[in-house]
């Protein structure tokens, strides 16, 4: 997977906070920056395409990561059949969503956002599209816009599981708001008792609560509870 861009959170992580976040992610067994797709797909958000999908000569077979230009080329090739369909159905919200997903999965977030916006213009009431658009905004560095879009989803769909999961992650990673993250995750479990990632969320809550009193700028030799 290519390295994720680090969003501008409007704040600065202390060494302690960054360490705490990394430790909790290790405990739960997920990568920092991990989000889930709005559609309910349980694949990590923003995962790079499989090596088999990469055109020859792009360095995917020898352990090298594709460059941004290569990723964009891959997206354009994968999107070609969908773009051809859009010529006859330019306002089809599902087609627009699928094109957005191609760009999203190849980490071309501005292009993904553009197609998600078009999809939502045709069908503004799709919580899955808006959830994916929110994560694309997050990976583009716009934390506030990501949270605003998730708020729209949760206003009309207050139990949307993956929106709640991502809200917690973004509040935590993007805003250093551990308490807000825990609140979102607890609501997720209360309203979705059979959530597929229930155990992971419970582990996040348990670990995060151990560090809920760490404030921005606070100095400590060792995070509490470790």
Image (cartoon, helix red, strand yellow):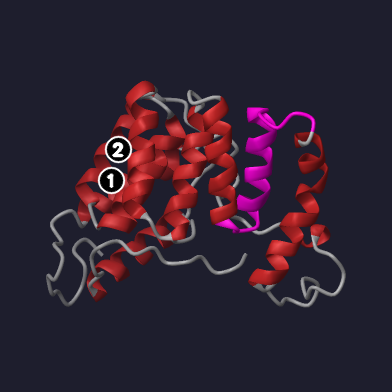
Relative depth, front residue between 21 and 11 = 11
- Could you tell me which secondary element the residue under label 1 belongs to? helix
The answer to whether any part of residue 50 appears in the image is: no
Relative depth, front residue between 223 and 154 = 154
Please tell me which residue is depicted at 53% across the width and 35% down the height of the picture. Answer: 129
User: Residue 11, position in %: x, y?
Assistant: 23, 65
User: Residue 176, position in %: x, y?
Assistant: 24, 58
Q: Which mark is residue 184?
A: 2
**Residue 93 in which image quadrant:** top right
Residue beneath label 1, please? 181
In the displayed structure, 166 sits above or below 89; it is below
| Side of 104 where 185 appears, left or right | left
Quadrant where the N terminus is found in the figure: bottom right
The magenta segment is 88-109
Q: Give how far apart the Cα atoms at labels 2 and 1 are.
A: 5 Å
- Could you tell me which secondary element the residue under label 2 belongs to? helix
User: Residue 163, position in %: x, y?
Assistant: 42, 36
Q: Residues within 10 Å of mark 2 (few under 14, many from 20)?
A: many
| Side of 83 where 220 appears, left or right | left
In the displayed structure, 18 sits above or below 195; it is below
Q: Main secondary structure of the magenta part?
A: helix
User: Residue 145, position in %: x, y?
Assistant: 36, 47
In the displayed structure, 154 sits above or below 21; it is above
Cβ atoms under marks 2 and 1 closer than 8 Å: yes
């Amino acid at each position: 997977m290519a390295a994720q861009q680090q969003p501008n959170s409007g704040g600065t992580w202390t060494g302690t906070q960054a360490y705490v976040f990394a430790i909790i992610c290790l405990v739960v067994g997920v990568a920092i920056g991990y989000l889930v797709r709005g559609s309910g797909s349980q694949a990590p958000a923003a995962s790079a395409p499989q090596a088999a999908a990469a055109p020859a000569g792009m360095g995917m077979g020898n352990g090298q990561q594709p460059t941004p230009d290569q990723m964009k080329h891959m997206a354009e090739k994968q999107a070609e059949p969908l773009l051809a369909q859009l010529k006859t159905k330019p306002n089809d919200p599902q087609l627009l969503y699928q094109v957005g997903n191609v760009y999203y999965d190849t980490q071309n977030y501005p292009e993904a956002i553009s197609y998600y916006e078009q999809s939502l213009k045709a069908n503004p009431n799709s919580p899955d599209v808006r959830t994916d658009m929110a994560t694309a905004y997050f990976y583009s560095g716009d934390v506030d816009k990501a949270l605003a879009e998730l708020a729209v989803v949760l206003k009309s769909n207050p139990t949307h599981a993956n929106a709640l999961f991502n809200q917690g992650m973004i509040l935590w990673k993007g805003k250093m708001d551990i308490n807000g993250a825990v609140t979102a995750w607890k609501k997720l479990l209360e309203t979705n008792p059979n959530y597929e990632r229930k155990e992971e969320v419970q582990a996040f809550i348990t670990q995060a609560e151990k560090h809920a009193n760490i404030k921005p700028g606070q100095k400590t030799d060792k995070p509490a509870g470790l």
